[in-house]
């Protein structure tokens, strides 16, 4: 069998990408690396590409976003191709299923219903999803089923809390959540004072983080986005500390904590100007 030539591939971009992936996975003439992959080995790349899309969005880099969206689309095509090889489904089945779902969940666009604003649509969306899950329910199902284990921990915490809130397991305001955070911090202090082992401290710190994610949810703040922004803020300010010390011919290792803290405050004040 001859090798494929680029000019022989379909002209339509989507068909072309599907054909490229089929060739990459060809058992005889494909790429050795691509042939060896499976769903589990590719999954980490899928997650990584999704984060790179989010990063391009945060940086508002449209050229990079176009490229990263292509990388993410490749992941979808890759998984679909492997499923097709197993006789499970193909890419077009994936596209068909999501199209059907979008039409069903937007009756105000594709039907006779109407919604006045985005908040009302969000409520309707969640109600539709709940009805879909109820239709598939089994006797031992939980309201928490379907919250993926592979999600980032803060995002999964928020989603678990939202699911529990649907059945009334929730505080009605941020105040009690703040009280809970303070309670959890008190428990961390107590464990430290008692010389608790690492597993106990891990458990208590996890409780603090879970409660903080709950506070973010009550304030309509995305905890993942908030932490990403703080990570970037920390990076900016620490780099200011490094640059300032370098201008003095010094390194952070040679500076005292007090000196670095003063430069940190300087960086904070500069951002407020």
Image (cartoon, grey):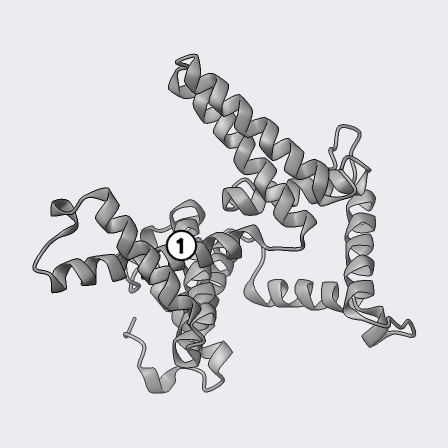
Q: Position of residue 99 (x, y in %)?
A: 69, 69
Q: Position of residue 91 (x, y in %)?
A: 55, 65
Q: Secondary structure at mark 1?
A: helix
Q: Position of residue 234 (x, y in %)?
A: 36, 55
Q: Nearer the viewer, residue 16 or 4?
A: 16
Place residue 248 in its image quadrant.
bottom left
Place residue 178 in its image quadrant.
top right
Q: Position of residue 11 (x, y in %)?
A: 45, 87
Image quadrant occupied by the C terminus: bottom left
Q: Nearer the viewer, residue 49 or 14?
A: 49
Q: Is residue 102 left or right of residue 6?
A: right
- Residue at (51%, 42%) from the top-left corner? 153
Image quadrant occupied by the N terminus: bottom left
Q: Is residue 172 left or right of residue 258?
A: right
Q: Is residue 45 above or below residue 40?
A: below
Q: Is residue 123 above or below residue 134?
A: below
- Residue at (56%, 62%) from the top-left corner? 90
* Residue to which mark 1 is pinned: 231
Query: Most extreme residue toward the top, as rendered?
Result: 194
- Residue at (79%, 48%) from the top-left corner? 130
- Residue at (54%, 40%) from the top-left corner? 149
Mark 1 closeness class: few <14, some 14–19, many ≥20 residues within 10 Å: few
- Res. 26 in view: no
């Amino acid at each position: 069998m001859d090798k494929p030539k680029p000019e022989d591939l379909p002209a339509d971009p989507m068909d072309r990408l599907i054909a490229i992936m089929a060739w990459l996975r060809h058992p005889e003439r494909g790429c050795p690396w691509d042939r060896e992959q499976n769903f589990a080995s590719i999954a980490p790349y899928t997650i990584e590409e999704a984060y790179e899309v989010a990063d391009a969005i945060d940086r508002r880099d449209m050229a990079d976003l176009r490229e990263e969206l292509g990388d993410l689309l490749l992941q979808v095509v890759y998984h679909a191709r492997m499923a097709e090889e197993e006789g499970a489904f193909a890419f077009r089945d994936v596209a068909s299923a999501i199209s059907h779902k979008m039409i069903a969940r937007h009756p105000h666009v594709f039907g006779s219903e109407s919604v006045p604003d985005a908040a009302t649509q969000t409520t309707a969306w969640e109600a539709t999803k709940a009805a879909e899950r109820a239709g598939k329910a089994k006797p031992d199902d939980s309201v928490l089923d379907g919250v993926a284990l592979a999600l980032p921990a803060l995002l999964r915490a928020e989603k678990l809390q939202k699911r529990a809130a649907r059945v009334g397991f929730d505080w009605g305001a941020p105040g009690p959540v703040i009280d809970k955070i303070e309670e959890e911090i008190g428990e961390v202090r107590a464990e430290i004072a008692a010389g608790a082992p690492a597993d106990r401290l891990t458990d208590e710190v996890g409780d603090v983080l879970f409660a903080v994610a709950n506070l973010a949810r009550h304030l309509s703040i995305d905890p993942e986005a908030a932490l990403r922004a703080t990570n970037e803020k920390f990076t900016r300010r620490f780099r200011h500390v490094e640059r300032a010390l370098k201008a003095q011919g010094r390194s952070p290792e040679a500076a005292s904590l007090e000196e670095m803290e003063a430069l940190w405050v300087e960086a904070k004040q500069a951002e407020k100007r």
